[in-house]
Amino acid sequence: MTTEEIAKAFKELGHATRLSIFKRLVKSGESGISVGVIQEDLDIPNSTLSHHISSLMSAGLIKQRREGRTLYCVVEYEKLLGVISFLQDECCSDDMQG
């Protein structure tokens, strides 16, 4: 991943509402959850939620899939692991890892 991609991910996760949405999605696992469930769980107005979901998608942190009339959001775990690896690779020496 490029430094720009990492920076974009951090920028989008730097907003409290987006971080809450992302955290909820991580808890949902690889199957994801519907936009309606996110809205109910976090009590976010629909238009606001759409804006935040778009921001997370533009950073490549989540994707969406449609099943019938229901729209699901799913974490892009490869991207998440790339961000985590970036931090580990850049800041941790061997003696700090245990």
Image: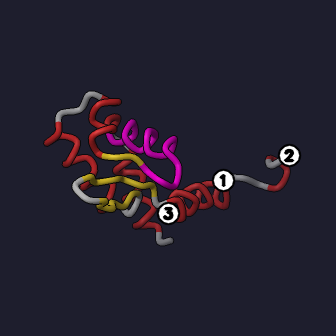
Compute the Cα span from label 3 to label 1.
19 Å
Front position among marks 2 and 3? 3
User: Is the residue under label 2 in contact with that under label 1 (CB below 8 Å)?
Assistant: no
The foreground one among 13 and 95 is 13
**Label 2 neighbour load within 10 Å: few <14, some 14-19, many 20+:** few
Residue 7, x across and y down, in percent: 41, 58
Indicate which disc residue 64 carries.
Answer: none
Position above or below: 29 against 66: above
Residue in the image at 43% along x and 51% along y: 32
The foreground one among 28 and 98 is 28
Residue 62, x across and y down, in percent: 39, 57
The foreground one among 52 and 24 is 24
Q: The disc labelled 3 sits on which kind of residue?
A: Lys
Residue in the image at 64% along x and 59% along y: 90
Question: Mark 2 — residue?
Answer: 98
Magenta-drawn segment: 18-32
Q: The disc labelled 2 sits on which kind of residue?
A: Gly
Q: Secondary structure at mark 1?
A: helix
